[in-house]
Amino acid sequence: MKLITVHLPEAYLEGLDKLVKRRMYPNRSEAIRIAIRDLLKRELWEQVKLWGDRL
């Protein structure tokens, strides 16, 4: 894995911390990885299935 730096609004961090506190995710990093995976799946990979690699 690669390490990146991301600047997020305080409200996003507070939301992430609530999810971690509720034990929905083990930590912020895992929650962010899952969110990015879901975004890519929805916005990119599904389009590739439909349109091929022409995007």
Image: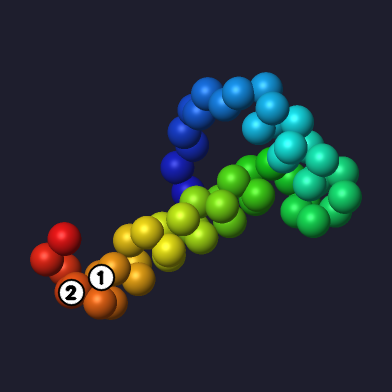
Question: Would you name the residue on which mark 1 appears?
Answer: 48
Image check: 31 left or right of 14?
left
Q: Quadrant of the C terminus?
A: bottom left
Whether residues under marks 2 and 1 lie with C-beta atoms below 8 angstroms apart, the answer is yes
Q: Nearer the viewer, residue 30 or 41?
A: 41
Q: Residue 34 appears at what percent x and percent y?
A: 58, 56
Q: SS class of the residue under badge 2? A: helix
Q: Residue 30 appears at what percent x and percent y?
A: 65, 50
Which residue: 29% across, 68% down?
A: 47
Which residue: 43% across, 63% down?
A: 42
Residue 52 marker? 2
Q: CA distance from mark 2 to mark 1?
A: 5 Å
Q: Nearer the viewer, residue 34 or 11?
A: 11
State the image quarter where residue 14 is shown.
Answer: top right
Asked if 1 appears above or below 5 in the picture, the reply is below
Residue 15 marker? none
Circle 2 residues within 10 Å: few <14, some 14–19, many ≥20: few
Asked if 48 appears above or below 1 in the picture, the reply is below
Image check: 21 left or right of 19?
right
Circle 1 residues within 10 Å: few <14, some 14–19, many ≥20: few
Task: Count all numbered tags in the image, as a single digit.
Answer: 2
Which residue: 75% across, 53% down?
A: 25
State the image quarter where residue 16 is shown.
Answer: top right
The kind of residue tagged 2 is Gly
Asked if 22 appears above or below 48 in the picture, the reply is above
Q: Residue 18 appears at what percent x and percent y?
A: 82, 40
Image check: 51 left or right of 31?
left
Q: How is the image coloured?
A: rainbow
The outermost residue toward the right is 22
Q: Nearer the viewer, residue 42 or 37?
A: 42
Q: SS class of the residue under badge 1? A: helix
The kind of residue tagged 1 is Val
